[in-house]
Amino acid sequence: MLGLKGMDVTDEGNQVRLQPLFLMEVLELREAMEELGGPDTHVERGRITTEVARRYESTLSTLGSGLDSGIPSIETLAQCAAQLKYLKKILDDLHLLAG
């Protein structure tokens, strides 16, 4: 979709620089996942999963609206797409932990 808006996502020169705040949030989520253990593991894992799923859906909605309206810059849309990749990976890892 970003390619249709003029961004060649396969070009290495178009690497998206994620916002430091987002990267810190990802690190905090990863740390929380590593600390899962004990009798309330499923409750905490569920809380983290819900939080990440909400963030994923919100980011996906922002990306979709932006693609439809053309209002945000292509860089903003690329940020959303990159964030979705990180959030999806976290969700996948949480589902693996639930095993």
Image (spheres, grey):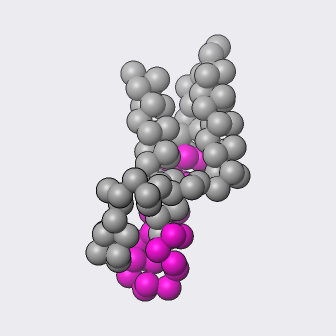
Q: Which residue is drawn at 47% across and 55% down?
A: 15
Q: Nearer the viewer, residue 14 or 78?
A: 14
Q: Which residue is drawn at 47% across and 69% down?
A: 77
Q: Residue at x 43, y 48 (%)?
A: 85
Residue lying furthest top = 38
**Range of residues picked out in magenta:** 51-76
| Residue 88 screen position, x and y as percent | 43, 45
> Main SS of the magenta segment?
helix
Q: Which quadrant is home to the C terminus? A: top left
Q: Residue 76, can we see it?
A: yes
Q: In this view, does 83 lie to the left or right of 8?
A: right
Q: Residue 43, can we see it?
A: no
Residue 23, above or below 7: above
Q: Which quadrant is home to the N terminus? A: bottom left
Q: Is residue 83 left or right of residue 64?
A: right
| Residue 45 screen position, x and y as percent | 57, 31
Taking the magenta stretch, the answer to whether it contains residue 53 is yes
Residue 77, above or below 21: below
| Residue 22 screen position, x and y as percent | 64, 51
Residue 58, above or below 70: above
| Residue 72 screen position, x and y as percent | 52, 79
